[in-house]
Amino acid sequence: MTSNDTAFARACQVIPGGVDSPVRAFGSVGGTPRFIDHAEGAYVYDVDDRQYLDLVGSWGPALLGHAHPQVVTAVRAAAGKGLSFGAPTEAEAELAELIQLRVPLAERVRLVSTGTEATMTAIRLARGATGRDLLVKFAGCYHGHSDGLLVAAGSGIATAGLPGSAGIPEPIAAQTVVVPYNDAEAITAVFAELGDRIAAVITEPAAANMGIVPPEPGFNALLRELTRAHGALLIYDEVLVGFRVSAAGWWGLEGRTISPDLFTFGKVVGGGMPLAALGGRADVMELLAPVGPVYQAGTLSGNPLATAAGIATLKLADAAVYERIDAASAALQGAVVDALNGAGVTHQLQTAGSLFSVFFNVDHPVRNFADAQTQNTAAYRAFFHSLLDSGIALPPSAFEAWFLSSAHDDRVLEQAVAALPAAARAAAQQG
């Protein structure tokens, strides 16, 4: 029995399923999750001190690699002054200014602790601004685990094959209208029928929680057109893609041509610490307490350690960082395609900036959640474990994005390139 087995058995005695977030449990790939002891650069090390080339990146925050010295120094300096104050700090305004500098549409910013909290607040704000109740979301998009959003969600929900969650009252679920992603006809029909009752549309502007599913050309523009015409708000959930796929997130990558009313940010914005944010139009954001009637609060919101990590990360993430990550991603994508083609594995590799994922045994573009669910998850499972045995850690789910960092240089990626042919052959054996 490895130390991972022992750690997992111990955790299962005190933590439901042995993990504090479901996808970590290896439920869809099988086996024992790796318990991480420490990380540095492009690598994580488990409790058996085995090294893994990390393509999870803490599910997105590790844009600069793990334990970047300047980020760690900033957090240590902040910790030396105190861990939490429950009072405002200048660092909160500094981080908000850095967000606004990258995304000027974020005219006002509120810092919170989690992406779920950010999206939940954005929706409450949209309902407060419009006086309406209905929310529109897209099947397979994941916006956190608040009640009204855990309907036809992606990420861990997709992994578990669940349509939603127990414990959500039907009247709350009924306030969420679910539409297929990338279906212009369906979203147009929904607004034709319910437009005067819709408070907001929330979307991943490039879906990354059912695997990577980019928007069809013109789809996000249509969402802006429909919401504006019917007096609803458009919320870009950039918790995952924000400040990762470009300095200005997906909004920047698509050319800054669309003007959402609200954004939510997470992952990179906290530099690996528990921090998220929402931002948007000043007139909408100032409906938040204490200046407006929409209540939101959090004892640890704008925590000084988290803001220090976020400030350091955003300051370090310059154009050269994004160029390195884009180049590394392109190189790894090419190697994955070559290996799968060499093994005769039908697949679809899809991208959103530097993010990508592979749909096994799919021979056409994946446009929505229904398409994503046709993939051969057994093939991914075999591919995953072959790479894990070679010291390469992929996301433990076929419905997640692969993440690289500026620490993933050519030397680091050689390990992955060398291991891919065997992993592709393992996938091929699953049909």
Image (cartoon, rainbow, N blue to C red):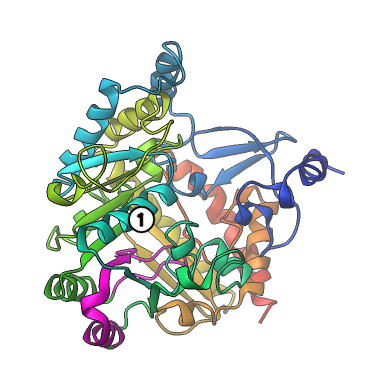
Residue designated by label 1: 354
Q: Is 203 covered by the magenta stretch?
A: yes
Q: Is residue 239 visible?
A: no
Tell me if I can see residue 186 in this picture. yes
Task: Name the foreground residue: 190 vs 401.
Answer: 190
- At label 1, counting other C-alpha atoms closer than 10 Å, the crowd grade (few under 14, some 14-19, many 20 or more) is many
Q: Residue at x 47, y 72 (%)?
A: 171
Please give the range of residues in magenta. 186-215
Residue 55 location in percent, x, y? Answer: 52, 50
Q: Quadrant of the C terminus?
A: bottom right
In the rendered image, residue 194, in percent from the top left (x then y), is placed at: 26, 82
Q: Residue visible at 38% across and 37% down? A: 270
**x and y percent of residue 260 in the render?**
19, 60
Q: Residue 307, image x and y in percent? A: 35, 29
58 to the left or right of 405: right
Above-or-below relation of 149 to 293: below
Compared with residue 418, is residue 216 higher up or lower down, i.e. above or below? below
Looking at numbered disc 1 in the image, what kind of residue is underneath it? Ser
Residue 379 vertical position relative to residue 14 in the rendered view, above or below: below
**Residue nearest the viewer, comparing 348 with 255:** 255
67 relative position to 287: left or right: right
Q: For the residue labelled by badge 1, is the local secondary structure a helix, a strand or a loop?
A: loop
Would you say residue 212 sits in the magenta stretch? yes
